[in-house]
Image: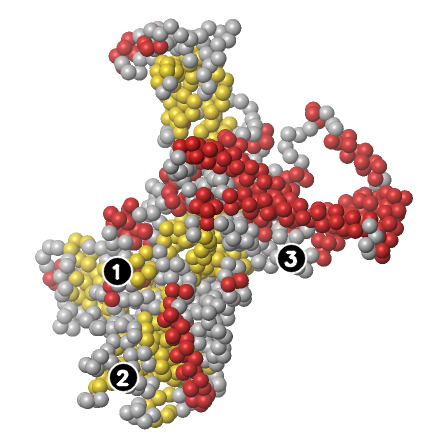
Amino acid sequence: MNNAKEKLVVEVVGAHNLMPKDGEGSSSPFVEVEFENHRERSTVKYRDLNPVWNEKLVFPVNDVADLPYRTIEVNVFNEKRSNNSRNFLGKVRVSGSSIAREGEEIAQLYTLDKRSLFSHVRGEITLKLYLSSREEVKQVINGNNGAGVMVSKKNKRLQQQQGTNLAVQQQLNQENKLNFQNHNHPKPVEPGGPGDMMKPVVITTGPNPTIPPVVNPAGLGVGRGGVGNGGVAVYSSTGAPGPAGEYSLKETSPHLGGGPLNKDKTSSTYDLVEQMQYLYVRVVKARDISCVFGGGGELVAEVKLGNYRGITKRVSLTNNAEWDQVFAFSKDCIQSSVVEIFVKEGNKDDFLGRVWFDLNEVPKRVPPDSQLAPQWYRMEDKKGEKAKGGEVMVAIWFGTQADEAFAEAWHSKAANVHTEGLCSIKSKVYLSPKLWYLRVHVIEGQDVVMGEKGSSMMRYPELFAKVQVGNQVLRTRIASPLANKSLSNPVWNEDLLFVVAEPFEDYVLVSVEDHIAPNRDEVVGRVVLPVTVIERRLDEKPATSRWFNLDIHFNNQNESKAMMRFASRIHLRASLDGGYHVLDEATMYSSDVRPTAKQLWKPHIGVLEVGVLGGTNLVPVKIKEGKGGSTDAYCVAKYGQKWVRTRTVVDSLSPKWNEQYTWEVFDPCTVITIGVFDNARVDKNTAVAAATRDSRIGKVRIRLSTLESDRVYTHAYPLLMLHPSGVKKTGELHLAVRFSCANMVNVLHKYSMPLLPKMHYVLPLSVNQLDGLRYQAMNVVASRLGRAEPPLGRDVVEYMLDHDSHMWSMRKSKANFFRLTNILAWFVAVSRFLESLRNWHKPVYSALFMIVFMVFVLVPELIMPCVLLTMASVGLWRYRSRPRHPPHMDTRLSYADVVHPDELDEEFDSFPSSRSAEIVRIRYDRLRSVAGRIQSVVGDMATQGERFQALLSWRDPRATFLFVIICFIAACGFYLVPFKWVVALWGLYVLRPPKFRNRLPSRAVSFFKRLPTNADSML
């Protein structure tokens, strides 16, 4: 053997809670490891259900590049000394893709799996797997029953010290089991016994101040401050460990595009995710089946790989049965070296034909290669004869998630999901409906006839107009009597705005009603208009107004047709305003600011690519029978009109998605939102699943303007949720983000343009109108996405769109107050510095300041150039310390880490309040409503101050670069032009007549409003 080559080291650390099988309540376990036809075993630990080995089994590796496609099989047996036999205690199959390099290895806790349906297995085993070129293979004959053990020299010297550390670690793991954040390791799901299996766990060095530091040469439970490899990938993190870094952002180093071993296979479409290997089996059709067996019924095809079974849909038993279905088996869960395909009749167990393939002979396919052409294969019957088995058309290959068949394939990890829930676990892309503002200007009525109840009462009529579009209802004020108008000709002259979505399915119902008594209105006429006939406008020019006849006999159709000589009328001006952007999310988190009308869109300026790699340490959301806490997690990302939903990783606290998505970017000052949820529709009880809402796990917001162009950001974002008991970390989300732009000039030009479309400034909407319209837009989007398949639940849409961001919260008010305090602290510091100079506390500084002041007084032309040069120099100096990571949810900034429980109880209180005393409830609600406005004002003030700080902070690198360049240019301009002329021109410009002014904001104001703030990091 060439010892210079790298070798695979399987370090068997220990086992826990094994099944007693010696008939005396105990077992004598030993471990047997098999890799590439090499089999080695450990020593026997007699009468020990929690054995500790700390032994290294070393195996030769023929080809390191092929290691991700290999598996290591670990079996645990009980030795029976009476008859020299053994009992099965459990097994673990580990994928080669989870093997680390030496020095990066981490101890992992695997749950022992069954060998068959009737196996009685329990317990866990702790292993460390890594590649090493320094280990020496040496055969040692141990005295314990002569068992041959592969042990290295280095391991022999450290075995005693490791045993002590392992005992301490196992005891701490048992005592502090609930304090650890555990990882899931993907493993097969037994079809026959889901209730007997527990999800495996990976031990990490989570923050726990009760554990003293222990020198551990074996590296037990010690990573690189990051995440253990759960069987698919290793995320090495540079975040600070311990409680101080629990909520911090961590930079990771995933093997994007397949890593260095697969550079030749990297596809440009999937270069922001880690390659996941799958075995694809496409079963197309079968022929010559009925002629052999005859009879009616239905045919199914079954694909079997180890303990996994995938079954096709049923087709009628004809001469040519066609299925055309694809099955995907994850490489890290492959349990056999042979895949079998059976053709069966209906529910019968006996097969009509069988064909099998050796996995070592299966080809590999990587896009953009064309799809593998299926071939006909002669099947063999139960007797092994191929002459009577018919033929089946099959294609089989190894591929990655970049394969075209990945999205619609049946996945092995979803083997335990019921048929009704399969459609809810696939990845999908949704498009929000195109939203329009519908403006109905109710001008006046003419010859309005009072109703029977209203005309019989001696009073002045109180007429108002009510407009209903779908479930949106608005009403005008009661018409005031005018001297030149009769009471039957009311005048309202009010604008009512609604939100409608394409395709237009709603009708506009306009009714004139008479307010007879409190809570009592009488309809005196109405008119119905389809939205499709309403005029569309793209600018501020008013639409054409029209008179519409009111139907005053809508309750009696026969009378309505007979009497058409006289009709009351109403004057309306209705239009679909395409020049606005319909806000369906909070303005500060907006992901799209384009107008509704496509004719007004500008070309896109860049591309946003997001790779959703995976999650770690997710909190268990549900309790599954026999499995304890579990989570069926999926991600939802929203940017612009495009929503994406990843596939659901079933029963995993450390899911690996590795899905990549792309968006066109029309404005860099926008935010992408990514949320993580638990899929409640995976449950077999469909009635319960339909009524259960998907649980929220957390979300991440990333502002594109804070990202450098063409740089790949790979980070683990903390997922934080606020509960009545306080802020909780619910896991971490691993993302790879890249913002690319082809022309930087177009991006920089966007900073001088208004943030919103022109109509928002020419015909502005009030704050109350925007709040109401945003709520209606959210309802429309949630309704449309809920009609998709699989549906995107209303709870998911509300959480992604921050529907409750405007509600009162004492915590948010304090956080905004502290944000404002931080801004004012800079001015306080400057004033104190000037006061110290005036008082000559530092004579040298005071003398220098006096000299500079005299120079500026004598030569005022130097003031502005020096100030601008100073700001530009400070900006360049601070470039070195610019933020290197995107912003994330900040608990300290959100005042969530020290909030009082009573304030949280107030924040999670319902609206209206649930207080028992009526008067307290009224005052409490009034206080919350008023304080909500104050909270918004304080937040806006803090936002403006933070934008000043962002000018030179390089948080938005393009904006700071543009500002620095402008400062240099302006410095030269102020130096060349006398200052007094500049001041004079500026005064004339500010005081110019309104006729020469533009209603759009200036370019400087537009640039300022585009600067980033800390609002992106607010919870």
- Compared to residue 458, the image places residue 63 above or below, namely below
Q: Regarding mark 1 in the picture, which secondary structure is present there?
A: loop
Amino acid type, residue under disc 1 in the picture: Glu
> Which of marks 3 and 2 precedes in the sequence?
2
> Which of marks 1 and 2 precedes in the sequence?
2
Disc 2 vs disc 1: which is toward the camera? Answer: 2
Q: Are marks 2 and 1 in contact (CB under 8 Å)?
A: no
Which label belongs to residue 44?
Answer: none
Check disc 2 and report the residue beneath it. 47
Amino acid type, residue under disc 2 in the picture: Arg
- Residue 15 lies, in percent from the top left, at 33, 77
Check disc 1 and report the residue beneath it. 625
- Residue 151 lies, in percent from the top left, at 40, 88
Quick one: 798 or 759, which is closer to the camera? 798
Q: Is residue 832 left or right of residue 657?
A: right
Q: Regarding mark 3 in the picture, which secondary structure is present there?
A: loop
Disc 2 vs disc 3: which is toward the camera? Answer: 2
Residues under labels 1 and 3: Cα distance? 50 Å
Q: Quadrant of residue 784?
A: top left
Residues under labels 2 and 1: Cα distance? 31 Å
Q: Residues within 10 Å of mark 3 (few under 14, many from 20)?
A: some
Which label belongs to residue 882?
Answer: 3
Q: Residue at x 49, y 55 (%)?
A: 610
Quick one: 262 or 54, which is closer to the camera? 54
- Compared to residue 505, the image places residue 401 above or below, namely below
